[in-house]
Image (spheres, rainbow, N blue to C red):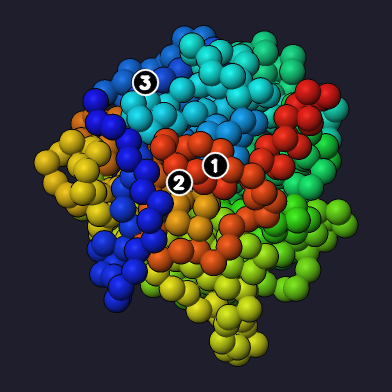
């Protein structure tokens, strides 16, 4: 077992090659075949390597967002719509999970999502399922049908989905989650694209909110209005301001009529529930899409940009830094400038933490959709493993959920507020945003 070493010394000197701009200092893996109790899933997919369906269980997979958890060292991770499309994910329940990566042992442990207590398995205490018991949403839900997809030849909708009006992967394709200053969860969705909010128990608190003038093909309310986004082009990224009052939703693909390879970033006031400040355009430079937008401070953000390749074929998996104040005005559009922070295909690995015999570490997954700032020198990155389909690590073997802790050679200037405390992570001290965690715990305790 390799001992985890956390180095706090600052690196000095000249320019650093992009291939060595970050160092792997922690790696923890949640096996691909990890399940939690729930409705039978996988009834609408075919997998030769992991035959479906999965009786009375749900895969713990598809992590598309990560935010601080209820206790130091723990995180909340969000599962996306399930098996990759609206047409095959009606029996996947939308959930967020509590986890604790153990950088010493390389394992990822389930934790109680309300307290952070470590659990033996992903049982009902480890997750919050999204639901609409008070019928706040306008979108049609699988929970209101007798048979999945309203087809009599399909299996009946699970009794728990119907009884609790649980949200499924055929209802929304959630891609990110953030916690606002009132302790409410906000989710970004690709099918609308929509924003919607829930309480700490995952219960929807209002109708879904569309992006003005933007319609995905799956939008149930567009009528005769042509879609101006491609499929899987809706809201992918979602950042929140340090004070928890402004969301920054980001589209994955360009809107028809916008400059090619430019993606919109909006500002949204969570109290008035209105869009403000128009939008910015983020220029893709080598990727096909973005995977996440995460705040560093009030103005600066991290963006995961990726191609659609995996394994040895992967060519472009990078994290950029942007500042919403730093843009060129082009034909009336605020086109952001950006700088490279991390090349995820060229990470320095002097301790060979993945035991592959190389001092170079690659994160070659087709979808990398979660990043969080730990402190000015460290970030956590997680892949979306698309269980059981993605095979970025080994051909023919479903990818695991892999958490990596990276030490940056150049510091981020600030960390997301509120980050007022320190907690032990591995063998070093790093800021973990304790005030936000404590607020989360209070919300859960009184929900």
C-alpha distance separating marks 2 and 3? 22 Å
Closer mark to the observer between disc 3 and disc 1: 1
C-alpha distance separating marks 1 and 2? 9 Å
At horizontal 66% and vertical 23% (from top left) the residue drawn is: 115
> In the rendered view, would you say 384 is above or below 16?
above
C-alpha distance separating marks 3 and 1? 20 Å
Query: Which quadrant of the structure image shows residue 174?
Result: top right
Q: State if disc 3 and disc 2 touch (CB < 8 Å).
A: no
Q: Mark 2 highlights which residue?
A: 380
Among the two numbered marks 3 and 1 on one chain, the one whose residue lies closer to the N terminus:
3
Q: State if disc 2 and disc 1 touch (CB < 8 Å).
A: yes
Q: Mark 1 highlights which residue?
A: 66
- Disc 2 is placed on an element classified as strand
Among the two numbered marks 1 and 2 on one chain, the one whose residue lies closer to the N terminus:
1
Q: State if disc 1 and disc 3 touch (CB < 8 Å).
A: no
Category of crowding for the residue at label 1, using alpha-carbon neighbours closer than 10 angstroms: few (below 14), some (14–19), many (at least 20)? many
Residue 19 placement, left or right of 273: left
At horizontal 52% and vertical 28% (from top left) the residue drawn is: 99
Q: Position of residue 280 (x, y in %)?
A: 62, 74
């Amino acid at each position: 077992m390799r001992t985890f070493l956390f180095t706090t010394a600052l690196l000095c000197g000249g320019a650093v090659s992009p291939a060595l701009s970050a160092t792997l200092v922690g790696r923890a893996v949640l096996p691909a075949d990890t399940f939690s109790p729930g409705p039978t899933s996988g009834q609408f997919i075919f997998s030769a390597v992991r035959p479906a369906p999965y009786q009375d269980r749900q895969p713990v997979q598809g992590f598309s967002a990560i935010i601080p958890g209820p206790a130091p060292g723990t995180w909340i991770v969000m599962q996306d719509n399930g098996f990759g499309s609206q047409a095959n994910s009606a029996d996947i329940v939308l959930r967020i999970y509590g986890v604790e990566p153990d950088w010493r042992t390389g394992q990822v442990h389930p934790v109680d999502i309300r307290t952070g207590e470590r659990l033996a398995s992903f049982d009902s205490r480890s997750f919050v399922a999204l639901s609409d018991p008070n019928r706040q949403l306008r979108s049609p839900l699988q929970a209101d049908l007798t048979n999945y997809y309203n087809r009599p030849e399909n299996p009946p909708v699970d009794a728990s989905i119907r009884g609790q009006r649980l949200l499924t992967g055929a209802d929304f394709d959630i891609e990110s989650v953030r916690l606002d200053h009132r302790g409410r969860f906000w989710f970004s969705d690709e099918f609308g694209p929509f924003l919607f909010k829930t309480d700490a128990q995952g219960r929807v608190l209002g109708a879904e909110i569309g992006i003005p003038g933007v319609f995905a093909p799956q939008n149930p309310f567009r009528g005769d209005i042509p879609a101006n986004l491609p499929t899987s082009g809706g809201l992918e990224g979602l950042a929140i301001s340090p004070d928890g009052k402004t969301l920054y939703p980001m589209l994955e693909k360009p809107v028809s009529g916008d400059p090619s390879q430019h993606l919109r970033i909006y500002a949204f006031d969570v109290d008035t529930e209105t869009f403000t400040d128009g939008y910015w355009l983020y220029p893709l430079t080598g990727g096909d899409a973005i995977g996440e937008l995460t705040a560093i401070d009030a103005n600066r953000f991290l963006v995961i940009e990726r191609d659609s390749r995996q394994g040895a074929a992967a060519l472009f998996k990078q994290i950029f830094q942007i500042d919403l104040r730093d843009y060129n005005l082009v034909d009336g559009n605020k086109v952001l400038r950006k700088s490279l922070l991390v090349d995820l295909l060229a990470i320095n690995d002097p301790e060979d933490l993945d035991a592959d015999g190389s001092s170079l570490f690659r994160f070659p997954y087709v979808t990398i959709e979660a990043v969080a700032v730990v402190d000015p020198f460290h970030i956590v990155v997680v892949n979306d493993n698309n269980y059981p389909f993605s095979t970025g690590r080994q051909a023919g073997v479903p990818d695991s959920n892999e958490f990596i802790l990276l030490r940056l050679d150049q510091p981020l200037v600030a960390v997301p507020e509120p980050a007022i405390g320190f907690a032990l992570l591995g063998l070093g001290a790093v800021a973990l945003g304790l005030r936000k965690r404590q607020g989360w715990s209070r919300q859960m305790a009184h929900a």
